[in-house]
Image (cartoon, grey):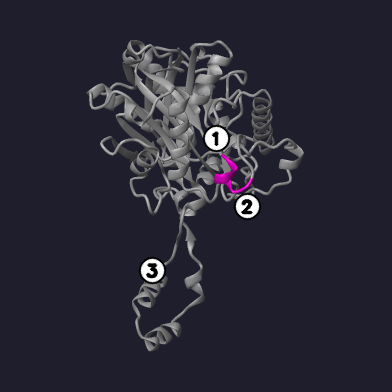
Amino acid sequence: MPMPCTKLDPPLAIVAGKRTPFVKAFGALSHIAADQLGVLAIRETLKEIGMNGDDIDEVVIGNVCGQADAANVARVIALRAGIPQSKIAHTVNRNCASGMESVFQAAQIIREGRADVIIAGGAESMSQVPFIYNDEAKQWFMQLQKAKKMSQKLSLMTQLRPSFFKPIPQLQLGLTDPTCGLSMGETAEVLSDDFDISRKLQDAFAVESHRRALKAQEDGFFNEEILLISGDITGSAPLHEDLGPRKKQSVENLSKLRPFFRRKGGTVTVGNSCPVTDGAATLVVMSADLAEKRGLKPLGFLNAYSIAGLDPKRMGLGPVFAIDKLLRGTGKELSDFELVEINEAFAAQVLACQAAMKSEDFNKTVLKRDEPIGELSWNKLNVNGGAIALGHPVGATGARLILTNLRALKQQDLSHGLVSLCVGGGQGVALWLERA
């Protein structure tokens, strides 16, 4: 019988981490590919603790959208970041949990003895996701490319159709679940219906995410977490902060937006959803025993993690299922965790998770629990804002959540963190972090 969660003994030490600023797609980082974003993150992460490429045994990077000219983007990132050619690298994809999956695989690799020190994380340029032409258009362009005589080219021009110039954004396809036929936003509408979550409540949640993110920026919380991208790279001004948080965001402003995913009677808008985002985040990890032997003081430790499956139509409830497994496997209670991060794919989705965790009926009928998981306090949840304000570069977010949670624990002199997110396709991931 498989265990509900994976417990790490010794735990995995998160020694250091850095990330790029997160920027809405087609904005300030749109011309920077995922591999270059990953290179920036790795270089700054190593610099943070005085390491170089020779100190790294392996690189594992999460990436969802895929970079056309870098099939195994982790290998490209590693080499361009100065990791020796003799060191290996591979890319992982668990949709929104890819950045976390890279850390889980790093733990497994270290446990089996293949490597001692690993860089894990994620990189995503959602700006550079390609467009897809239909089969007829692809065939026409291939014939045009092969044509050598002018007569052949002129003949092909007579077959040209306007439909050839209406490609489908791959991003649109990627954000639609092929098994249930719903876009990610439509799955949030399902949860809004299931738990009767009003538009007003979702908009208020979004405003609070921006308020907390802005306060964290003003207090300098993210300064050590985010690396500086020079003007030479951005092509304009240097960039050292997330560009998503909005100072003038309000419920009144958000109420003016039309529902985006369900035009009639919907509640989910672009304002109470996370934006499509570019960014990268990386972590240096090793076993706790090795960190102690080397005299390193880690940011914290990964003690246990869980991965759960559920109905793809309700993928946003993934954190509830994963947290349930984590608690069962570790014997912990929700109240044992002092700070919690649940990725804000949609306000409706996080609010639904809160409602489900405290619902006696949901816990008894769906999770088969005698008692509810518990009520998740607002004072513990996403205290520095979340993806609605900061953004969600899907391959990188999991690593960002780990880094942010550990740093928040340190800031508040707390010990135990719970990090979770939902995963497109009907999965959820949760992990237990402990501050060093």
Q: Residues within 10 Å of mark 3 (few under 14, many from 20)?
A: few
The reply to whether dot 2 and dot 3 touch (C-beta < 8 Å) is no
* Figure quadrant of residue 3: top left
Q: Quadrant of the N terminus?
A: top left
- What label does residue 349 carry, if any? 1
- Residue 365 position, x and y percent, is 44, 26
Q: Is residue 82 above or below residue 328?
A: below
- Residue 387 position, x and y percent, is 57, 35
- Residue 47 position, x and y percent, is 46, 27
Residue drawn at x 73%, y 36% is: 251
Q: Secondary structure at mark 1?
A: helix
Q: Amino acid at mark 3?
A: Asp
Q: Earlier in the sequence, mark 2 or mark 3?
A: 3
Q: Amino acid at mark 1?
A: Gln
Res 362 visible: no
Which residue was labeled with disc 3? 135
Q: Amino acid at mark 2?
A: Arg
Magenta segment boundaries in residue numbering: 230-236
Front residue of this view, candidates 378 and 72? 72
Which residue was labeled with disc 2? 263
Q: Is residue 341 magenta?
A: no
Res 133 visible: yes
Q: Is residue 233 magenta?
A: yes
The reply to whether dot 1 and dot 3 touch (C-beta < 8 Å) is no
Report the Cα–Cα distance between label 1 and label 3: 36 Å
